[in-house]
Amino acid sequence: MTEVATFADVPAIRALIAAAYHDDPMTEWLFADEQTRPHACAAWYGLFVEQYIAIGRASLLHEDGEVVAVALWRRPGDAPLSPTGVPSISGLMSALIGTEHGAELGEALHAVGGVQETQPHVYVNFLAVAPDRQRAGFGRRVVQPVLAAARAEGLCVRLETTNPANYAFCAALGFREVGRLQLASGGPLLRALRLDL
């Protein structure tokens, strides 16, 4: 059964996202060093995990006592993600990859706003399944509360992905591509997807 994550789940979710996103083209672009990438992923993506848990928008699945899938999402009207204090999202990025490179990638990432939905929608920022549990229905199960929330409010669901391995899964749920963006500075191709319910 899908649960709402708590701060006690942060370490397990950080580890899950680090493993699930390790070979994602976006992650490879942000954190080129393969040996330190799991640590960089857990640290940087973990800041997002904490923010989504704080607003009650982190859905997860346990199997055999382990977190096997998570969805981090938001509704219109949710408080903006804005971690206060140290580390900040941009500050941690600079610490992980250097100030100059961090600024360059940060500028390239700002372009993502150009393919994002302007109308009210439910947004899925992260959807991750443990690598050894993929293709077993966990992704579909963990995203069900997100789809139910969108359906109840008459909203579409949006997400972006840079991983071609995700396209078939998203298409099977009914998502369609509504935009593309080639990220600058050697970045990957990002596809914006939309699901009308």
Image: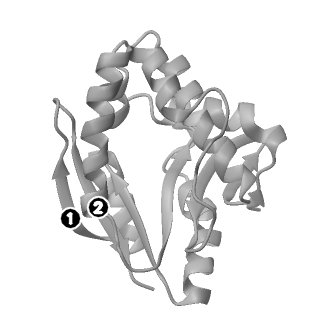
Q: Secondary structure at mark 2?
A: strand
Q: Residue furthest top?
A: 35
Please tell me which residue is depicted at 62% across the width and 67% down the height of the picture: 78
Is 72 situated left or right of 166 in this image? right
Disc assigned to residue 179: 1
Q: Quadrant of residue 180?
A: bottom left
Q: Residue at x 35, y 52 (%)?
A: 166
Residue toward you, 94 or 159: 94
The location of residue 109, given as percent across then percent down, is 30, 42
Alpha carbon distance from label 1 to label 2: 5 Å
Left or right, 110 with respect to 87, comes to: left
Residue 39 lies, in percent from the top left, at 55, 18
Q: Which residue is mark 2?
A: 192
Height in image: 22 above or below 6?
above
Colouring mode (rainbow / by chain / secondary structure / one colour): one colour
Front residue of 31/113: it is 113
Q: Which mark is residue 142?
A: none
Q: Residue at (52%, 52%) from the top-left corner?
A: 127
What's under tag 1, amino acid-wise? Gly
- In this rendering, the answer to whether 149 lies above or below 165 is below
Q: Answer left or right for 85 relative to 66.
A: left
- Which of pointers 1 and 2 lies earlier in the amino acid sequence? 1
Residue plotted at (38% across, 31% down): 27
The total number of labels drawn is 2
Q: Quadrant of the N terminus?
A: bottom right
- Relative image position of residue 55 (x, y in whole percent): 71, 58
Callout 1 touching callout 2 (CB < 8 Å): yes
Picture layout, residue 74 above or below residue 120: above
> Closest to the observer: 133 or 52?
52
Q: Secondary structure at mark 1?
A: strand
Give the image quarter of residue 28.
top left
Q: Amino acid at mark 2?
A: Ala
